[in-house]
Image: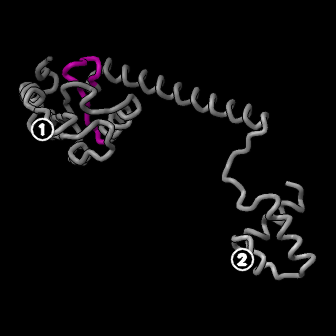
Amino acid sequence: MRGRPDSDAGSVFLGYARVSTQGQALDQQRAALVAAGCVRIFEEKASGAHRDRPELARMLDHLRAGDVVTIARLDRLARSTADLLAIAEQIRTAGAGLRSLAEPWADTTTPAGRMVMTVFAGIADFERSLIVERTSAGRIAAKARGVRFGPSPALSAEQIAHARQLIRDEEKPVAEVARIVGVHRATLYRALDRKKAGT
């Protein structure tokens, strides 16, 4: 792990330390962050899978332009590449930097670190586009096989036929028929209109 670089003179270093369970200790991360020059450390005992991390939110709210968020390892900050990029973007928007002591390439206070994050963002965007493309192709293939998407119809074809018979042959009011088949009157009207249109 590296200490505080000379080029960062004047920056305020804020540390973030996290362990996953109450039984784990923060001592090692805390010592590394203090040695790296952090003047304040936000500490959390919470799983990285939890979205609700109040100390992380407090640190991000505390950020000022020129600050540098320092972490012992990237997995202490984020639970996935997408999560890391989202947090890094919040830090960047605040005018602050991010650096990891265990991964010196993840240092947005340097041009090389910013370039790496840009590459990560590009890869994540590419992965998202592939997922969207595969999902779209899957839906098209499923529709070709007759799979229907969306919520199930409120009324079956038999119920609609029965409702139509009650209205036409027994001259029952639509509101009464809707109560009989167990739906709102507007739902019955829509079902009858769709059936009439052949959809």
Name the element at disc 1: strand
Q: Residue at x 69, y 36 (%)?
A: 139
Q: Is residue 160 left or right of residue 101?
A: right
Taking the spot 23% from the left edge, 24% from the top edge, the residue there is 73
Please say whether residue 118 is visible from this viewpoint.
Answer: yes
Out of 123 and 196, give the one closest to the viewer.
196
Q: Secondary structure at mark 2?
A: helix
Does the magenta portion include 104?
yes
Mark 1, Cα crowd under 10 Å, few <14 / some 14-19 / many 20+, is: many
Residue 149 horizontal/vertical position (percent)? 69, 45
Question: Please, is residue 53 above or below residue 74 in the view?
Answer: below
Mark before the other along the chain sequence, 1 or 2: 1
Residue placed most toward the observer, 7 or 120: 120
Above or below 150: residue 132: above
Residue 182: x and y, percent? 69, 71
- Left or right: 127 in relation to 103: right
Residue 68 visible in this rendered orientation of the protein: no
Pick the quarter of the image with the C terminus.
bottom right
Q: Is residue 53 left or right of residue 40?
A: right
Whole-Å distance between the Cαs marked 1 and 2? Answer: 63 Å
Q: Mark on residue 41?
A: 1
Q: Give the magenta part as a residue range.
A: 94-107
Q: Is residue 3 left or right of residue 196?
A: left
Assess whether residue 186 is covered by the magenta stretch: no
Residue carrying label 2: 179
The amino acid pointed to by label 2 is: Arg
